[in-house]
Image (tube, helix red, strand yellow):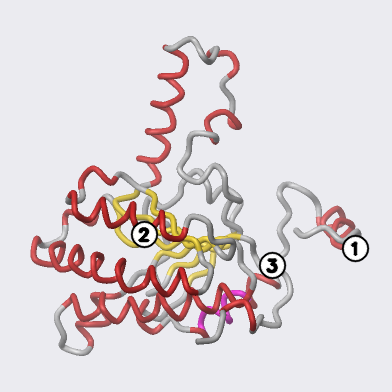
């Protein structure tokens, strides 16, 4: 098996962190007169393809929105099938990640998952914790509002313990308590299936991200589509409140924008 790091893609302006809303599994299955779970299974194959493509491109962090806090509202049989698929994928895919020196991290409120699934998550993270390649973040039972609320709660608890003064609370303090505080913020957010919204995904972290919307359903979002998204990103000019002239000067000075 080829190590992902051996075949880098030739693409300038690679983002450090890519976040993806994997949408369209159910619609992909319906088009083929298949049950919804068939779309989710096909989606796992797309995950494998995109993980490999991003790792080879030299991306540091890839975050995938696997299961939102709102997804519990779906039909019970679909949720049950998703949980079983999650268990199988964890056991199978984490070995692949480990062989390729990739690190797995799972964010979100785990308390709603079964004890078995929580334990599998912990074991999967522990297995890959010392790996030094790309970090794959799986957002499961995650919501951007949940993330900000739990960060605010931790800040309030620190104030109550006398460890933090209210007048010291600013953006940087709140950020330290968010789910991905130790990782770079997403540079590029991708959503598949033609939907033009972020659906409560990483509300805090996406403040300055570039957005890319693909029309294809997630199971069809493979290496070619991922490469197309990275190429589109490389042509973007990220200003962060600056003028074009300032951005051009930064680029000429060798800084990434």
Q: Report how far apart the C-alphas of labels 2 and 3 lie in the structure.
A: 36 Å
Q: Secondary structure at mark 2?
A: helix
Residue at 86% x, 56% y is 250
Residue at 42% x, 75% y is 96
Query: What is the crowding at mark 2: few (fewer than 14 residues within 10 Å), some, or many (at least 20)?
Result: many
Lateral position of residue 231 relative to residue 91, left or right: right
In-front residue for pair 139/231: 139
List the residue tagged with mark 3.
Answer: 236
Q: Position of residue 42 (x, y in %)?
A: 29, 82
Q: Is residue 229 magenta?
A: yes
List the residue tagged with mark 1.
Answer: 252
Q: Main secondary structure of the magenta part?
A: helix
In-front residue for pair 162/192: 162
Q: Is residue 72 above or below residue 213?
A: above
Of mark 2 and mark 3, the one earlier in the sequence is 2
Q: Which residues are magenta?
A: 224-230
């Amino acid at each position: 098996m080829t190590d992902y790091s051996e075949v880098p893609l030739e693409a300038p302006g690679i983002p450090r962190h890519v976040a993806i809303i994997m949408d369209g599994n159910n619609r992909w299955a319906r088009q083929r007169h298949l049950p919804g779970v068939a779309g989710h299974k096909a989606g796992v194959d797309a995950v494998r393809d995109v993980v490999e493509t991003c790792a080879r491109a030299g991306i540091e962090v890839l975050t995938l929105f696997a299961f939102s806090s709102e997804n519990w509202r779906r039909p019970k049989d679909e949720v049950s099938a998703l949980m079983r698929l999650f268990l199988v994928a964890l056991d199978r895919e984490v070995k692949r990640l480990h062989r390729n020196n990739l690190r797995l991290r799972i964010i979100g409120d785990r308390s709603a998952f079964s004890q078995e699934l929580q334990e599998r998550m912990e074991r999967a993270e522990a297995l890959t914790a010392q790996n030094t390649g790309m970090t794959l973040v799986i957002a499961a039972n995650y919501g951007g509002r949940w993330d900000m609320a739990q960060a605010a709660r931790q800040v309030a608890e620190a104030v109550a313990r006398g460890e933090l003064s209210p007048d010291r609370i600013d953006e940087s303090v709140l950020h330290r308590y968010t789910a991905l505080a130790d990782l770079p913020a997403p540079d590029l957010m991708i959503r598949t299936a033609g939907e033009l919204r972020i659906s409560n995904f990483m509300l805090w972290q996406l403040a300055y991200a570039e957005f890319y919307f693909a029309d294809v359903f997630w199971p069809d979002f493979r290496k070619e589509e991922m490469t197309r998204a990275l190429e589109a990103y490389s042509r973007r000019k990220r200003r962060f409140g600056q003028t074009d002239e300032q951005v051009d000067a930064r680029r000429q000075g060798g800084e990434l924008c």
